[in-house]
Amino acid sequence: MRLLVADDAALIRAGLVGLLERAGHQVVAEAGDAPELLAQCRRLDAGDGLPDLVIADVRMPPSMTDDGLRAAVQLRLDHPGLPVLMLSQYVAPAYAATLLEARDGGLGYLLKERVGRVADFLHSIELVAAGGVVVDPDVVGQLLNARRGDPLLDRLTPRELEVLSLMANGASNSHIATQLVVTPAAVAKHVANIFAKLDLGPSEENRRVRAVLAYLNR
């Protein structure tokens, strides 16, 4: 894939670029602050085309607050559907909620410590680039706690919530079955029940992504 990597810490950015390139991806642009991230996207769009995925730190100059996140939201407004994976040093559910306000896929929010789990991280970037949604387990837990009592989520059983939480972490049905020590058929039944209880009928496009976004946005 063609990737754009943005992080104000040069050493972290270099390490991330090296990891991605060793995995066979091409880093077509780098940025050290939010304005440069936007400028690099404009440059790529005017040249060889937008990247397949943007990977950016939440906190970047100039203000060192949520500049990276706000730049990513702007990129999604300018280029609907552009896959974006945000990295954060800390659990910040409010930042994740801001990113996930969009109702389509191609979104991810991970803690930087997850990058050290190379195989999982590489799987996450492929999933987000393909239009999926991946959210760090710690962030999922806090988002769920903040939404206790929501009428729509209250339709789900504890096991269905557990399955949906794993879906939000990017797990496939087979992975969920392994995690929960149940059969793939049992997971498929839980997933079908989740779709029904969240009012996602067979005609809905990409129901898995929509179910995760409904879960995280409530």
Image (spheres, rainbow, N blue to C red):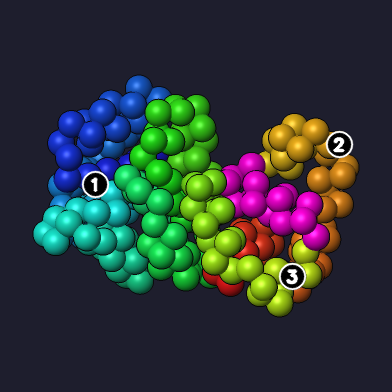
Residue kind at label 3, given as amino acid type: Asp
Which mark is drawn over residue 183? 2
- Report how far apart the C-alphas of labels 3 and 2 lie in the structure: 25 Å
Q: Quadrant of residue 208?
A: bottom right
Residue 89, image x, y percentages:
32, 45
Label 3: few (<14), some or many (≥20) within 10 Å?
few
Residue 4, above or below 181: below
Q: Is residue 158 magenta?
A: yes
Question: Circle 3 sits on which residue?
Answer: 154
The quadrant of the rendering that contains the C terminus is bottom right
Q: Quadrant of residue 81?
A: bottom left
Nearest to the observer: residue 144 or residue 41: 144
Residue at x 72%, y 50% (from the top left corner): 163
Residue kind at label 1, given as amino acid type: Ala
Q: Secondary structure at mark 1?
A: strand
Residue kind at label 2, given as amino acid type: Thr
Position of 190 with respect to 125 (left or right) is right
Q: Secondary structure at mark 2?
A: loop
Main SS type for the magenta part?
Answer: helix
The span shown in magenta is 157-171
- Which is nearer the N-term, disc 1 or disc 2? 1
Residue at x 63%, y 68% (from the top left corner): 148
